[in-house]
Image (cartoon, rainbow, N blue to C red):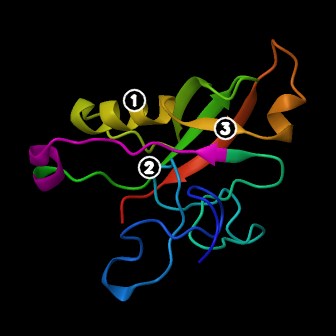
């Protein structure tokens, strides 16, 4: 595929694994998700967050022991973004916090590393924030 490195349509080195499907360069560290699975169409395995908002997730880092003895599960979180796209607050919702600091800590830390861009943020004043509910899955 043509294009300069990092542009849409550029095949990332080693992308696609053994099935040789094309991949896209991205700074995102998380699998694709959407906050509206029925209304937002997911294309090319990219993160979709709805109109006017692009999210750049970061993957949590668990110890090997935690992954083997107590693997993480699906959880819901409310992320509050500042105008500059940085996360101001993370709140686990719907009773999805595990209570285990070896699981909740790395997840919370990774959620604070998420970033967002887009017109929905640029329309905010310096003091306003934008809250987004996300579902994090470890399948």
75, 24: nearer the viewer: 24
Q: CA distance from mark 1 to mark 3?
A: 16 Å
Q: Is residue 81 above or below residue 27?
A: above
Judging by the rendered image, the residue that carries numbered circle 3 is 116
Q: Secondary structure at mark 1?
A: helix
- Residue 66 part of the magenta segment: yes
Q: CA distance from mark 2 to mark 3?
A: 13 Å
**1 vs 3, front mark:** 3
Q: Secondary structure at mark 3?
A: strand
Q: Secondary structure at mark 2?
A: loop
60, 104: nearer the viewer: 60
Is disc 3 surrounded by few (<14), some (14 to 19) or many (20+) residues within 10 Å?
Answer: some
Which image quarter: residue 115?
top right
Residue depicted at 32% across the width and 34% down the height = 106
Pick the quarter of the image with the N terminus.
bottom right
Q: Position of residue 88 (x, y in %)?
A: 61, 20
Q: Which residues are magenta?
A: 55-68
Is disc 1 surrounded by few (<14), some (14 to 19) or many (20+) residues within 10 Å?
Answer: some
């Amino acid at each position: 595929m043509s294009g300069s490195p990092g542009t849409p349509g550029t095949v990332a080195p080693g992308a696609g694994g053994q099935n040789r499907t094309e991949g896209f360069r991205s700074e995102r560290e998380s699998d694709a998700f959407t906050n509206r699975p029925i209304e937002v169409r997911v294309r090319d395995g990219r993160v979709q967050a709805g109109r006017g908002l692009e999210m750049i997730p970061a993957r949590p880092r668990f110890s090997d022991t935690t992954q083997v003895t107590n693997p993480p599960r699906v959880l819901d979180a409310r992320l509050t973004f500042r105008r500059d796209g940085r996360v101001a607050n993370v709140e686990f919702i719907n009773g999805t916090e595990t209570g285990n600091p070896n699981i909740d800590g790395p997840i919370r830390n990774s959620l604070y590393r998420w970033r967002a861009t887009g017109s929905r943020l640029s329309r905010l004043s310096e003091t306003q924030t934008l809250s987004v509910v996300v579902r994090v899955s470890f399948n």
